[in-house]
Amino acid sequence: MSRYLKFMNTSQGVQQIFTREKIANMSADEFEKYEKRIHAQMNKIGIPSNIELAYENQGKIFIWHTIGDGRVCDNCESMEGKIFENMEDIPDDLHPNCRCYIEEIDLKTV
Ligand SMILES: [Zn+2]
């Protein structure tokens, strides 16, 4: 599992990755909203560009999973099994203390 995916899969759900492009396209309000998280990410894994992530994305897909027990909310349930081809397209989870996670499938090894 890449350090990027490790970063996304927190014990409290899924957090998106901020890429250079994403940050560059943010409005001032959005940047203010996410500024703390961007700094935290910078300290942990840096701010990758889409090209850097393209290398990580190559030959892989990413699947959103709920924990699959009886307490999964409808919103999370609607995300179950959703496939992403690019890590940078994976959104934040939908609520605090979400237990969803992202599974990485390496298509070269299946
Ligand atoms: Zn969830």
Image (tube, rainbow, N blue to C red):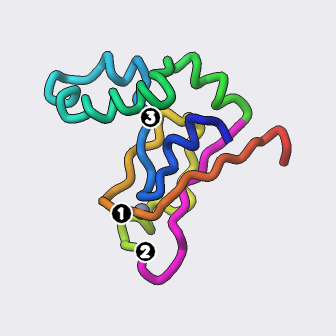
Q: As shown in the figure, which amino acid type bears the numbered disc 1?
A: Asn
Q: Which mark is residue 72?
A: 2
Q: Could you tell me which residue is drawn at 54 percent across and 36 percent down?
A: 87
Quick check: marks 1 and 2 in contact, CB under 8 Å?
no
Q: Does the magenta stretch include residue 58?
A: no
Residue placed under numbered mark 3 in the picture: 17
How far apart are labels 2 and 3 at the CA level? 24 Å
Q: In this view, does 87 lie to the left or right of 57?
A: left
SS type, badge 1: loop
Q: Return the x and y of residue 59 as percentages of the image width and height.
A: 73, 33
Q: Is mark 2 on a helix, strand or loop?
A: loop
Quadrant housing residue 75: bottom left
Q: Which amino acid does the dot numbered 2 rest on?
A: Val
Residue at the right extreme? 109
Q: Between marks 3 and 1, how big is the CA–CA gap?
A: 18 Å
Query: Residue 93, how many percent across, how many down?
Result: 38, 53
**Nearer to me, 12 or 53:** 12
Badge 1: how crowded within 10 Å, few (<14), some, or many (20+)?
A: few
Closer to the camera: disc 3 or disc 1?
1
Name the N-terminal-most of marks 1 and 2: 2
Residue that appears at 65% across and 42% down: 61
Find out whether the residues at labels 3 and 1 contact each other: C-beta distance under 8 Å: no
100 to 60, vertically: above or below = below
Respond yes or no on whether mark 3 lies under 8 Å from ligand 1. Answer: no
